[in-house]
Amino acid sequence: MSRLRNLRKNADRWGLRRAITNLCVKASARHLGIHLYVVRCRKIPDAPTHPQGNADLVFRLVEPEELLEFSKDPELDMHPDFVADAIARGDLAYGAFDGTKLVSYMWRSIDSAPDADNVWVRIRKPYNYSYKSFTRAAYRGRRISPSVHLFSDNEMRKHGYEYRVGFVGVTNYASLEMGKHMGSLAIGYAGYLAWFGMLFPFRSRPVRDIGFEFFRPAAKP
């Protein structure tokens, strides 16, 4: 009954065709191990695009020692081991601060980063990969996360990373719409089949051309 209620709810929001597609995609992931994503890319402009609004917040790089301290806050959803591994890989975190309080953040990788179930994502310069964004519940609805994205785009551009790449589930319609609003273009599809402990990745040609891929490392880097 709960699935039927969810189907009706999604149909009311996105239409019946999208609701049925969402149901089929989730069933394929759950029962067949097939995961499919839309890969999006944004060309970062040479002239910085400054975040609009939220003048009371400060946007900046979150320093490694700060990240280790913030990882102790359960609301921020940053496990200490995750943070330590990300810092060791050279990943960067950018955030929005209300005074000394970190209220929103996102991570950037210039090489590879974990996704889920020991599946990783790899990218290469001049592309960088954005992942794991989060905003505290009390600060949601103010479009802080898009502002963090724009700020971090500007910072990565200074270091020669001209494109931001990310991916989202093919039926995550809310995120797909937000990506359009922020200037990200869907360039193709990527995904993988997880079957009996093995990983079979696949990707469309435009995604392959930029070096984006899912993979499972033989050993944890």
Image (spheres, helix red, strand yellow):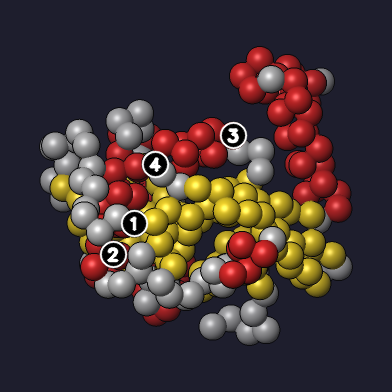
Do residues under tags 4 and 1 come within 8 Å of each other at their CB atoms?
A: no
Name the residue beneath numbered marker 3. 173
Q: Amino acid at mark 3?
A: Tyr
Name the residue beneath numbered marker 2. 157
Residue 31 visible to an observer of this rendering: yes
Examine the image and state in which quarter residue 83 appears.
bottom left
Instruction: Say left or right for 181 vs 63.
Output: right
Lower position in the chain sequence, tag 1 or tag 2: 1
Residue depicted at 66% across the width and 15% down the height: 12
Instruction: Say left or right for 128 vs 172.
Output: left
How far apart are labels 3 and 2 at the CA level? 28 Å
Lower position in the chain sequence, tag 3 or tag 2: 2
Lower position in the chain sequence, tag 2 or tag 4: 2
Q: Amino acid at mark 2?
A: Arg
Residue depicted at 53% across the width and 52% down the height: 40
Residue depicted at 66% across the width and 43% down the height: 170
How far apart are labels 4 and 1 at the CA level? 11 Å
Lower position in the chain sequence, tag 4 or tag 1: 1
Name the residue beneath numbered marker 4. 182
Do residues under tags 1 and 2 come within 8 Å of each other at their CB atoms?
A: yes
Do residues under tags 2 and 4 come within 8 Å of each other at their CB atoms?
A: no
| Quadrant for the N terminus in the image | top right
Q: Secondary structure at mark 2?
A: helix
How far apart are labels 3 and 1 at the CA level? 23 Å
Residue 44 badge: 1
